[in-house]
Image (spheres, helix red, strand yellow):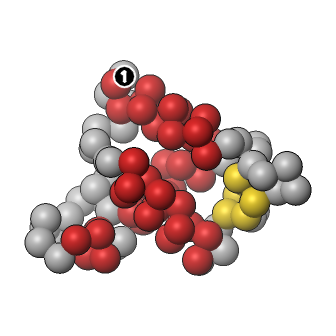
Amino acid sequence: KKGGDVNMILPKKQLSLSESFFGFGAFLLEKLKSPTSVDDLWLYYKNAYERKKYIVKFSFDQYLATLDYLYMIEAIKETEKGLLCSET
């Protein structure tokens, strides 16, 4: 898509919710109700994609950008043990 990852944050006419970092972040937050490592969260997404539970393919870089987005909006935090979890 033109414009790179910055244009993927919010859904719009040419970008569905599932294709946006906003939608992908919401999907990841479900898993982050309990502390999870970055690697385990990536494996969770890959498994969901392979089983067609999440239909959009994201690269690892886009995954990291989504985590950055979630951190910037204070939706996730890092625990003392270095795991990620939701702020709520």
* Quadrant of the rendered image containing residue 76: bottom right
* Quadrant of the rendered image containing residue 75: bottom right
Q: Quadrant of the N terminus?
A: bottom left
User: What number of labels is visible?
Assistant: 1
* Percent x, y of residue 15: 20, 64
* Percent x, y of residue 38: 61, 46
Q: Secondary structure at mark 1?
A: loop
Q: Residue at x 22, y 71 (%)?
A: 4
Q: Residue at x 44, y 64 (%)?
A: 65
Question: Neighbour class for label 1 at 10 Å: few (<14), some, many (≥20)?
Answer: few
* Residue placed furthest toward the right: 80
Depicted 50 relative to depicted 28: above or below: above
* Percent x, y of residue 9: 36, 71
* Quadrant of the rendered image containing residue 73: bottom right
In the visual, does 51 lie left or right of 57? right
Name the amino acid, label 1.
Arg
Circle 1 residue: 51
Depicted 15 relative to depicted 52: above or below: below
Q: Quadrant of the C terminus?
A: bottom right
In the visual, does 51 lie left or right of 69? left
* Percent x, y of residue 81: 85, 49
Residue 74 seen in the figure: yes
